[in-house]
Amino acid sequence: VITPGNVILNGEGIFLRRLGAADVGARYVQWLADPLVTDALEVRFEPQTKESIVSFVESMNEGNTNLLLGMFLKENKLHIGNIKVGPINWHHRTADVGLVIGERSCWGKGYATAAITLVTNYAFDELNLHKLSAGCYEGNVGSAKAFLRAGYLEQGRRISHFLYNGRYVDSLEFYKLNPRSS
Ligand SMILES: CC(C)(COP(=O)(O)OP(=O)(O)OC[C@H]1O[C@@H](n2cnc3c(N)ncnc32)[C@H](O)[C@@H]1OP(=O)(O)O)[C@@H](O)C(=O)NCCC(=O)NCCS
């Protein structure tokens, strides 16, 4: 089960911790209004407000099926993005992993790879999950590479799965198994 209260994970250049309503500031709202950030995210279909983001964060902290963590720079504690493990299926001990880095100046610095590695280890070692999966639009090179660098493998693709800029693209599907789980 997910421990209520805070989870803090320390990695290369960043740390991850649970988010609260107080973390939803103007910059966070701006990320989700930035077409370059939301280009390959489903959230682009639902315009966001501070209120909608606060209720998203609060809903993620309720119950036992999602672990939403903020990504923060160690050097100045700037909130640069989020990573989520969920929804968790406790019967099968599986979950999805998704992430966004909203501060574009922080792209290409290895933070996605670091964050994926941190939540993957936490999900396997502390939550005892068996398998994590992730998907991205074909062509999202940064996302695909970050999952591969964090030790995920491609498990297949869903053909013609997302409408992207007026044409259908495949969904690339990645997974990682817990080495201690049978
Ligand atoms: C996709 C995203 C998470 C990548 O984060 P990141 O911190 O830039 O990724 P990393 O720095 O860990 O990069 C991993 C690899 O991808 C490469 N990469 C990152 N962004 C890239 C891009 N736009 N084009 C090509 N390569 C890219 C890096 O150079 C690195 O390559 P290497 O392994 O050869 O060194 C980030 O750009 C983002 O949040 N984008 C917007 C939202 C999104 O698309 N989320 C993922 C949805 S599935």
Image (cartoon, rainbow, N blue to C red):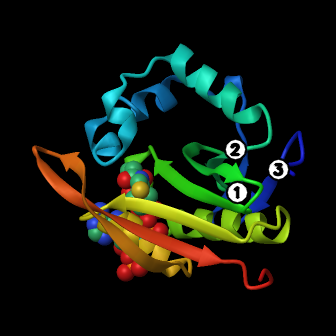
Q: CA distance from mark 3 to mark 2?
A: 13 Å
Mark 3 or 2, nearer chain start = 3
Instruction: Name the residue carrying label 3.
Output: 7
Instruction: Name the residue carrying label 2.
Output: 66
Residue 109 visible from this viewpoint: no
Vertical arrangement, residue 42 with respect to residue 99, above or below: above
Mark 2 or 1, nearer chain start = 1
Considering the numbered disc 2 on the image, is that residue within a helix, a strand or a loop?
A: loop
Considering the numbered disc 1 on the image, is that residue within a helix, a strand or a loop?
A: strand
Residue in view at x 83 percent, y 71 percent: 125
Instruction: Name the residue carrying label 1.
Output: 15
In the displayed orientation, state which residue is furthest to the top: 51
Residue in view at x 47 percent, y 71 percent: 174
Residue in view at x 50 percent, y 23 percent: 26
Vertical arrangement, residue 37 with respect to residue 29, above or below: below
Q: Position of residue 5 (x, y in %)?
A: 88, 39
Q: CA distance from mark 2 to mark 1?
A: 18 Å
Q: Position of residue 46 (x, y in %)?
A: 37, 25
Q: Position of residue 95 (x, y in %)?
A: 64, 58
Considering the numbered disc 3 on the image, is that residue within a helix, a strand or a loop?
A: loop
